[in-house]
Structure formats: C-alpha cells, structure tokens
Image (tube, rainbow, N blue to C red):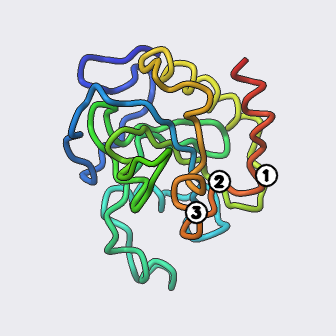
Amino acid sequence: MNLQANGWLAGIDRTPSPNCDERPDPEDIDLLVIHSISLPPGVFGGDEVEAFFQNRLDPEAHPYFQEIARLQVSSHLFIRRNGHAQQFVPFHRRAWHAGLSCFDGREKCNDYSIGIELEGTDDASFTAAQYRTLADLTAKIRALYPAITADRIIGHSDIAPGRKTDPGPGFNWERYRNLLS
C-alpha cells in the first residue's frame, strides 16, 4: 500500500465521505487517534457505519439512529472485524472524528490527526485480524508522517476524557504496540 498523490492509500477500498474539509496546515499531521464504533451499538457486520459516515443513515431503521442520523461524522479509516479496511477521507484532508478535543495542551485534534475507527465496542475484545490490519496501516501512516511517534498514538478517550471512552478497555494496547515493534 502506497499513498497516492490524492491522499488515498493504494489497495484500500475507498468510500468517500462528505464529512471532511481542508486542514489548516496539511503538513502538520502528528497524531494518530484510535476509535471504536458499532451501529447499532454492539452490532457488527452491517453497512450502518458506512452509511453514517456518508450521511445516509436511516433514522427509522433503529431507535438509536434517530439520535445520531443528523450528525456529520467521518474517519480516515475504518477496520471491520474481519480486518477489511475502508478509507473514507484522504489523509491531507481533515476528517471529523475527534470532535471537541485536546492533546498535549493543543486543541482541535482533527486539525493535525488521522483517525482510525475499529468496528467494536468499549468492552468487547477486538479481533486478531483487526490488530494485524491496524498495525500494518499504522506502520504505513507513520512512514508517511514520521512526526507520529509512538507517544502520539492515542485513544479517543485520551483526547476527550469524560466525553468519550473509546476504544475502551476491550482494546489491548500492549498487543497493538507489540505488533508495531
């Protein structure tokens, strides 16, 4: 997988999201944020996350969707339970994944971060395939953006404490970091 000139990774399915915009400084990418998501909560394998990131989630399909269908959210990448990855936003653009956030005294993490969503929940374990894909993608992202050092790979809960809890205790940071070394 190589980065193409337009900010997309070669070899990854593209599913463009309208929920992105220009970064204040496209050269200022130095943070990787790991998230988890499932729609409806705790249900895996459908196309609801894709629909959500593309503003086409049917609010009548599930009661929870009525709460979130109008939100405009995206992530650069999404990794399904089977390890399959989709890219929603090219890296040079700002995905809307972090929301109100702060890291190391700097606010607006969307401005300078790449977001990766794992299909999962805070308290469920993630799959071996997801860890392998995440580690592979992380290595490629870090090769493209060397300012993303090991200490600048964090969870959503780290940049939005009290507001967000993902990827949660079900995510094994030690396992992930061991795959990176």
What residue is pinned by disc 2?
Answer: 167
Q: 102 or 83: nearer the eye?
A: 102
Q: CA distance from mark 3 to mark 2?
A: 12 Å
The residue at the point 50 percent across, 85 percent down is 63
Secondary structure under tag 1 reads loop
Residue 89 at x, y percent in the picture: 33, 40
What residue is pinned by disc 1? Answer: 125
Say which mark, if any, is on residue 161.
3
Q: CA distance from mark 1 to mark 3?
A: 21 Å
Q: Which tag is nearer the camera, tag 1 or tag 2?
A: 2
Q: Which tag, 1 or 2, sits closer to the chain's start? A: 1
From the viewer's side, name the closer residue of 117 and 54.
117
Residue contact between numbered discs 1 and 2, judged by CB atoms under 8 Å: no
Q: Is residue 121 left or right of residue 6?
A: right
Residue at (23%, 33%) from the top-left corner? Answer: 25
Q: Amino acid at mark 2?
A: Pro
